[in-house]
Image (tube, coloured by chain):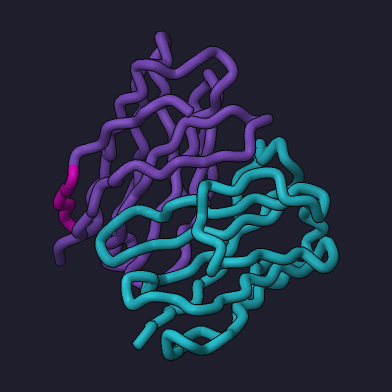
Amino acid sequence: DTEVTQTPKHLVMGMTNKKSLKCEQHMGHRAMYWYKQKAKKPPELMFVYSYEKLSINESVPSRFSPECPNSSLLNLHLHALQPEDSALYLCASSQDHQAVYGYTFGSGTRLTVV
Amino acid sequence: DAKTTQPPSMDCAEGRAANLPCNHSTISGNEYVYWYRQIHSQGPQYIIHGLKNNETNEMASLIITEDRKSSTLILPHATLRDTAVYYCISSWGGYQKVTFGTGTKLQVIP
């Protein structure tokens, strides 16, 4: 298995809702990442987990809460989001924090906040 | 991570070689050059990476200048499916933060 699987592919949520994005990989990668991508812009790093521990938080608002329950799974919990948080959310993984061999990205979750 | 500079857009005729340049003049000695591409609304796809030497794989070739200040990604026979945004990134192997620049939008024309 050489893929990063993200679910759901599309999500519409209200500003008072709580929802979660899920990311899964079975490549034995020990580093996992969340990126946010607005339309016509490059992906922006949000969080990095290395060996199931949060190692980088790019000053992301607390309404985004990441969780790494095990080495194969990465969640992003969403609460009280704003319309401007609508974006494509990408998950990625790499062999370890060295990432010498590059990153594998999922296809993303398209989030719309109404 | 060193800052990279790429032209915002390029056109290439189908079947021809596409040569995508990238400037990374502030790259440090232990930073790799990575290339990814992103086809519309999909996740970025790893293409190739290198440190000093030129590299080739089944998708592309990477030419790095001797001073390592710039590189060129070569798609030898571009097809319509190669239409995408191509990102050049320089990053330490041991540092986890990867910053994407604005990339080059490559349009392959029939």
Name the residue: 28% across, 46% down.
B102
Q: Nearer the viewer, residue A14 or B46?
A: A14
Picture coordinates of residue A41 (x, y %)?
Answer: 29, 57
- Quarter holding residue A105: bottom right
Q: Is B45 positioned to the left or the right of B7 in the image? A: right
Q: Magenta residues: mostly which secondary structure?
A: strand
The residue nearer to you, when weighing A87 against B51, is A87
For the C terminus of chain B, the quadrant is bottom left
Left or right side of A37 for A34: right
Residue at horizontal 55 percent and vertical 23 percent from the top:
B31
| Depth check, front residue: A52 or B84 | A52
Rendered colour, chain B: purple
* Residue A82 vertical position relative to residue B5 in the rendered view, above or below: below
Name chain A's colour.
Answer: cyan
- Classify residue A18 as left or right of residue A31: left
Q: Residue at x 72, y 50 (%)?
A: A54
Q: Is residue B12 magenta?
A: yes
Q: What are the residue bounds of the magenta stretch? A: B8-13
Location of residue A105 with respect to B55 vertically, above or below? below
Q: How many marks?
A: 0
State yes or no: residue A12 in magenta.
Answer: no
Q: Residue at x 28, y 66 (%)?
A: A39
- In the rendered image, residue B46, in percent from the top left (x then y), is placed at 52, 51
> Residue A2's spot in the image, x, y percent?
70, 65
Q: Is residue B81 above or below residue B78?
A: below
- Image: A55 above or below A92: above
Q: Quadrant of residue A52?
A: bottom right
